[in-house]
Image (spheres, rainbow, N blue to C red):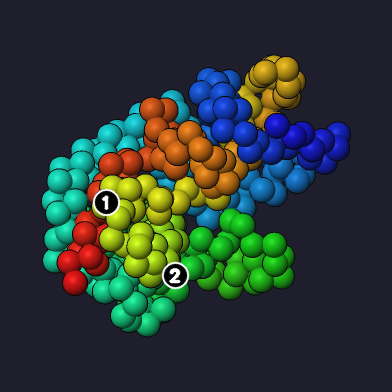
Amino acid sequence: MKRYRVPGVLDIYEVSDPEEIEAVNNDPRIDRQLALQNCPFNWLLVRRSLSVLSYAGKRFPTMSPRGSMERKSAQEELWNRLNVKVHEMKLGPEELEPLAQWVRGHGAEESLGLQAQQILGHLFSEAFVATAESWDAAATLVKAPRSNNVLKLFWWQVSGKVRRAKRQLASMVNDDLSAVNAIGIAAHNLVKSLHLMKALYSDSNRRSTLSPAEAANECLVAPVSVFRQATVAGELNGNTFSRNSLFILNIGQAAKTKGAEALVFMSDSWSSCPGEQWVPAMLEGVWLRANRS
């Protein structure tokens, strides 16, 4: 756990060790309340993320605090909805054929994003149809909280590009913010997973020896990082923190550590991902269909 602190300017902890990430995430003093009354650099990071990952005055569930009953309810509802489909996904239904074809090496590179977004969008609306415009909106949404191009970000805010992207995606899924997060943010992790799967499939030896479950597990991708913020001052594992200290949990890299795979979905924690079972099942289904040929 590394602390970067300049009094009155910034106060940030960067956490990359799997055990420390779990400790921070499980500590009730460290949450996603994400107060803006903070030092300038912390304020900038938090403000940028909240401005992107909120819509119509509400935060995305992935940015809502642990005490939010609305977040908890939405998380449980989506968990149940997705888990009903797990068995079907493992069998490789017809809707996964476009992804299986792409894994086999057929189809243009730029088609993958649309196909991934379509699979996720259809979970929330049977009428959902991914388009070049909706994928462009998703690209805007995922870049805005992380880009270091200050001029581009400034222009996007002034021109309303981020706001229009969220409005477009929300209109396609009945303003369901869990759905907007899926088609705007999570879809990019699915694209990364399918790139890994395509590489596995190209190895004829691994293609013939890996089971669907083994292939899926090798292709799981976690978000790059997530934010947490201290609600009070305190100490954790010998590290003192101040009220509003910002914690950046680098789960993307940490989840690659042997034995830390549960970090992909933050399993068994208050912030666990509702797709914890559905995503691996869907990847199993894609691998199964890809190998049927």
Label placed on residue 274? none
Q: Residue at x 36, y 59 (%)?
A: 206
Circle 2 — which element?
helix
Q: Where is residue 214 in the image (x, y as percent from the top left)?
A: 32, 48
In which image quadrant can residue 272 be found?
Answer: top left
Give how far across and how far down residue 150 sits, in percent: 71, 65
The residues tagged by marks 1 and 2 sit, at their Cα atoms, a distance apart of 35 Å
Which residue is pictured at 44% across the width and 42% down the height?
Answer: 264
Q: Mark 2, residues whose alpha carbon is within 10 Å: few (<14), some, or many (≥20)?
A: many
Visible residue check, residue 133: yes
User: Can I make out residue 85 in this image?
Assistant: no
Return the x and y of residue 64 as percentages of the image width and height. 46, 37
Front: mark 1 or 2:
1
Q: Given the image, on which type of amino acid does mark 1 rest?
A: Ser
Seen in the image, is 242 located left or right of residue 282? right
Q: Quadrant of residue 99?
A: bottom left
Q: Nearer the viewer, residue 104 or 129?
A: 104
Q: Residues within 10 Å of mark 1 (few under 14, many from 20)?
A: some
Q: Residue 233: x and y, percent?
A: 70, 19
| Residue occupying image coordinates x 18% and y 53% | 89
- The image shows residue 154, relative to residue 250, as above or below, that is below
| Residue linked to disc 2 | 137
Tally of numbered discs: 2
Q: Name the residue under label 1.
A: 211
Which of 204 and 155 lies nearest the eye of the viewer? 204
Q: Which residue is at a point 40% across and 50% down the rendered structure image?
A: 218
Identify the secondary structure beneath mark 1: loop
